[in-house]
Image (cartoon, rainbow, N blue to C red):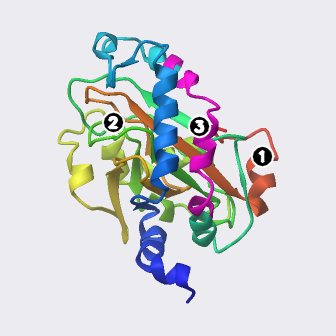
Amino acid sequence: MNSFDREYEGQLAAFRDRGVIRLEGLIPPEKVEAAVNAARDRMSPAGIWEDGGWLVDHLRQAPINEGAKFGRKLKGAPEFDELVVGEIPNVVARLLDDRPTFCGMAVPQPLFTLPNADSWEVPHNVWHLDVPRLPDCGIPGVQIFTFLETVAPTGGGTLVVAGSHRLLNGNERISSKNVKRRLKDEPYFRDLMSADTPNRQRFIDEVGHCGDVELQVVEMHGEPGDVYFVDLRVLHTPAPNATPVPRIMLTRRFFLESQREAIYGDDNRETMS
Ligand SMILES: O=C(O)CCC(=O)C(=O)O
């Protein structure tokens, strides 16, 4: 075992088991500070960052595309590119057994959500995959997420179903829509994706099962500098933001070079790049 694998041994095993891990403080503080400041600087002319604080209360009832409008202002900051070089590609490479990868988008993608909810629960809708299940593929790549502001629990961090990457792996291509359709045959996913299911906090607090696969909803929250690594087979969804501050995250997808054709090579492409 090399020194890298020794350092991350537990995390590598957790990643294979759950399809999601968080490495705290992975990005050097000076890069984090530059990126956070760049995000705030871009929000300042838009009038929602002023004198060291967020001014977003008046936007609480704003239509959903208002948040997207602010998110677009974050696109292309060079400070964001700097966050995802260095240790992140090294970890991704190890999670993919050092096989060559390519990025689905030229630059990392900001994820921005205004405060938009008075209360918070695990959503029943918008669960999806960015990549179909690919025949005889195993893991097709890794998506990383980091934070450009502190994202507290209930603060709009992306939700994933840990363990879901272990389901429906076979020798056929299955679209995101059909993965969902098939998963709904299982009580865990039928309940998760039904608006009629009460007590939705249990999806986070308790471990569910599908056969011998353990499943649990994980809410991404953390500090700038922390990084989540997610198997691209993991079911995920955007979440409401019930805190008084915007949710600002950054994501990037690393795909296996060997799957380029399967991912991009036909009209069936599903990636969000
Ligand atoms: O947290 C979000 O806005 C959703 C992110 C997402 O679905 C994705 O990046 O694939």
In which quadrant of the rendered image does the C terminus lie? top right
Instruction: Residue type at mark 1: give it.
Output: Tyr
Please report whichever mark, 1 or 3, sits nearer to the chain's N-terminal start. 3
User: Residue beneath label 2, please?
Assistant: 123
Distance, label 2 to label 1, CA atoms, is 30 Å
Ligand 1: does it lie within 8 Å of the C-beta at label 3?
yes
Q: Nearer the viewer, mark 1 or mark 3?
A: 3
Badge 2 element: loop
The stretch of residues the image draws in magenta is: 69-89
> Left or right of 43: which side holds 169?
right
Evaluate if marks 2 and 1 touch, with contact meaning CB atoms under 8 Å apart.
no
Of mark 2 and mark 1, the one earlier in the sequence is: 2
| Circle 3: residue type | Gln
In this view of the protein, which residue sits in the foreground, 209 or 251? Answer: 251
User: Residue 208 at x, y = what percent?
Assistant: 28, 60
Query: Where residue 191 appears, x then y in whole percent?
Result: 30, 45
**Residue pictured at 37% horizontal, 11% vertical:** 62
The prevailing secondary structure element of the residues shown in magenta is: helix
Disc 1 and disc 3: Cα gap in Å?
19 Å
Q: Position of residue 13 (x, y in %)?
A: 45, 76
* Residue drawn where x is 52% and y is 23% of the image: 42
Q: Which residue is mark 3?
A: 109
Location of residue 158 in the rendering, given as x and y in whole percent from the top left corner: 41, 42
What label sits on residue 264 in the rendered view?
A: 1
